[in-house]
Amino acid sequence: MTTNRFVLRRATNVDSDALSQLSQQTWRETHLEDLAMSIPKHDVEFYLRTQKSPEWYASKIADPFEATWLIEDKISNEIVAYLIVGRCEVPHPDFCLNKDGQIEFLYVRRDRQSQGIGKQLMNVALSWMKEQFPERPIWLTTLACNFKSQKLYMSYGFTIVGDFYSNVGDTQRHLIIMRRENSSS
């Protein structure tokens, strides 16, 4: 996607620091502010330091079985959204390791939501996965209380097929598992 203001492109290693900063911002916006999850500060800091670090993003970008896209605002030169896709690793009995694809993360900065940016990222993700995982399902997980994200995913044909719990420190998060068929048509 290239418009007068926004550019969609694959991430490179030079984007690792900016992706880390954006992911920490959007994670806080989503989990702590929008969804008002009560997670102790020390658990949040540890999670962000270990799971959203520049090194973590550099490893994702370098992984040949994953793809990271971002949307950059040409006016401010800031990354405003990102998406990571790759091999599926969801806790569901029907997924096939190394055969099915997964949308791992899709985050859009709060002040850029409802502008079609998430849809642009979804479109590129689905196209990439059609090539990488032909005729195999596409999976994702999202917070059970995040109805906004569920609505977006359902508009792309994803359905809820299960759920599980994941911890941030001692705080349990309820997540749902969604799946979409990845047909060649």
Image (cartoon, helix red, strand yellow):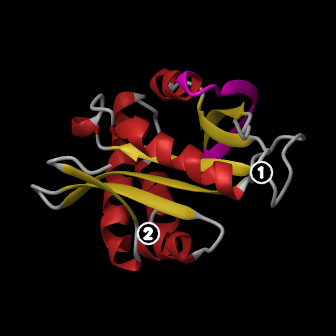
Instruction: Locate residue 161, reporting x and y percent.
Output: 77, 27
Mark 1 is on which residue type?
Answer: Asp
Indicate yes or no whether the magenta region holds residue 158: yes
- Residue marked by disc 2: 53
At 84% from the left edge and 57% from the top edge, which residue is drawn?
Answer: 97
In the image, 77 versus 27, the foreground residue is 77
Q: CA distance from mark 1 to mark 2?
A: 26 Å
Range shown magenta: 155-167
Considering every residue shown, the one lying at the far right of the view is 93
Looking at the image, residue 54 lies above or below residue 35: below
At 54% from the left edge and 48% from the top edge, which residue is drawn?
Answer: 125
Instruction: Locate residue 121, reporting x and y percent.
Output: 43, 45
Instruction: Locate residue 85, reporting x and y percent.
Output: 58, 55
Q: Quadrant of the C terminus?
A: top right
In the rendered structure, the answer to whether residue 6 lies left or right of residue 131 reads: left
Mark 2 is on which residue type?
Answer: Ser
N-terminal of the two: label 1 or label 2?
2
At 9% from the left edge and 55% from the top edge, which residue is drawn?
Answer: 75
- Residue marked by disc 1: 100
In the rendered structure, the answer to whether residue 6 lies left or right of residue 172 reads: left
